Image (spheres, rainbow, N blue to C red):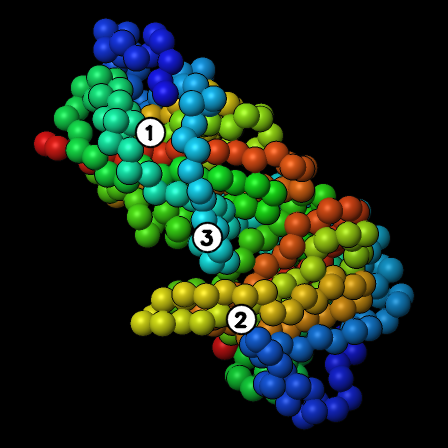
Amino acid sequence: MIRAPFDRPEVLAKLRPAWSAARSLLLPGACDPSARPRVELRDFDLAHRGRYAFADLYDHALHAELRDFAAALTGARLLDGSLRLFRFRRGSYALFYDDAKSRLTAGVEVTLDLSEDLCGPPAIYASGPGQRLEIPQAPGLVAVVERSPSTFRYDRYFPAEVGEGEVLRLRAAFHYAD
Amino acid sequence: MIRWPSDLDGAARAFRSAQPFAHLVIDGAVAPEDLRRMSLAFEEEPQTLMENEIYLHLRSSEPPLSEPLRDFCAALQGSCATVARLCGQPLSRCDGSAYVYLPGHYLLPHSDSRTSEGRAVAYAFYLDEPAAGGALELFDCERRDGEIVRTTPALRIEARSNRLVLFEVHDLALHQVCEVLEGARTSIAGWFYP
C-alpha cells in the first residue's frame, strides 16, 4: 500500500526530524489508491456524530505494513489499534464527538487517502484555539499525526459541489508501547 | 415591531404540543416595510466567514451594527414576557446576530444546550429566502442510557421570508440548517435566557 521510496526505513528515518518538530507529517503520493481494500461498507448515520460508510478491517499484513511504516518514521514502538476504512460522499461528515468515541489518546494515526478523485473537503485535527492541522483531500496522500488527549479530529461536511465523487480514507491507529 | 399571535394561549399550546420537540412558526412576523428596511440593512452589515466542525456561514457581530437589525433585536428583548408566555418558561433577556448562508454553507445537526450559557429558547427570523436548500430541520432522537442512539429527520421548516421560528433548547432538541444550494439565506438568530 505504501509506495516507494516511503517503504524504505532509511528514507523514513531521514524524515524523522521533520516529524519530531511538528508531530505530524503529510506525504503526498506516498500510497497507492489502486491497492485499496475491496470490502463491503456499512452506513453510519447518527446526526450528532456523523454520516458516512465504514468497514473495520482485520488485515494483519496491511496493519503490520502500516505499523512498520509509522514506527520507522516516528522512531517509536507502536502497538496496533484500529484499522478502519471510511467512505465519504455528498452530505457526509464526521464530528469531534464521533472521534471522541473511538479516538487514541496517546499514539499515532496514519491516514491514507485511497480516493480516485480529488473532490472532497479536508479532515481537520484540532487541539485547542489556533492549534489546527488541515489534511487536504488528495489521492495518494498519507498523513501521520500524533494523537494526544487534547487532539480531536473531524471530517468536514461534503457539500453538493462534491457531486458524484467519493472519498476513501483508511485510518490506522497505533498506541505508543512505551 | 413584532406581530405576535393574537391568541397567545393557543400559540403556547401549539408550541408545547409540537413535534419532534416544542417549537412555533410565526409567519408575517414583522410589517412589510420593516422587512424591507431590514433586508436593505443586510447589504451594509459587516459579516465574517465563520467555520468550525459544525458550521460554515457568514456572521455579524452580536448584536448587529446596522440600526434596523438592532431594532429587531431590541424588539425581541422588549418581548421577553410574551415569549416567556408562549414558551412556558421565565425569560429575561435575549441576544442575536445576523447570518448569511451562501451556496455550500450549512449548520450541521447539533443541540444548542450549553449548561454554562443557560440558553432556554432559540429563535430564527428569516429575511431573504434561498432559491434552494437552507431549511431548518428538526430531528427526533431516541436516547438509551444517557446516549443518543437513533436520530431521524422529523420536520423541515423552510426559511421563508418574514418567518419567525421559536424552539426550546435541551439536549435532545437536535436541529440543523440544511446546506444552501442556490441563492442566499439571511436571518437573525439567537437565544432567550432566564
Amino acid under disc 3: Phe
Q: Nearer the viewer, mark 1 or mark 3?
A: 3
What residue is drawn where x is 49% and y is 39%?
A87
A105 in relation to B173, above or below = above
- The residue that mark 1 highlights is A110
Q: Secondary structure at mark 3?
A: strand
Q: Which mark is residue A44?
A: 3
Q: CA distance from mark 3 to mark 2?
A: 17 Å
Tell me, yes or no, whether dots 3 and 2 are on the same chain. no
Q: CA distance from mark 1 to mark 2?
A: 36 Å
Q: Could you say which is closer to the camera, residue A122 or residue B190?
A: A122
Residue count near mark 2 (Cα–Cα under 10 Å), binned few <14, some 14–19, many ≥20: some
Q: Of all residues shown, which one is farthest toward the right?
A: B33
Amino acid under disc 2: Asp
Amino acid under disc 1: Val
Q: From the viewer's perspective, is A52 left or right of A117?
A: left
Q: From the viewer's perspective, is B178 left or right of B53?
A: right
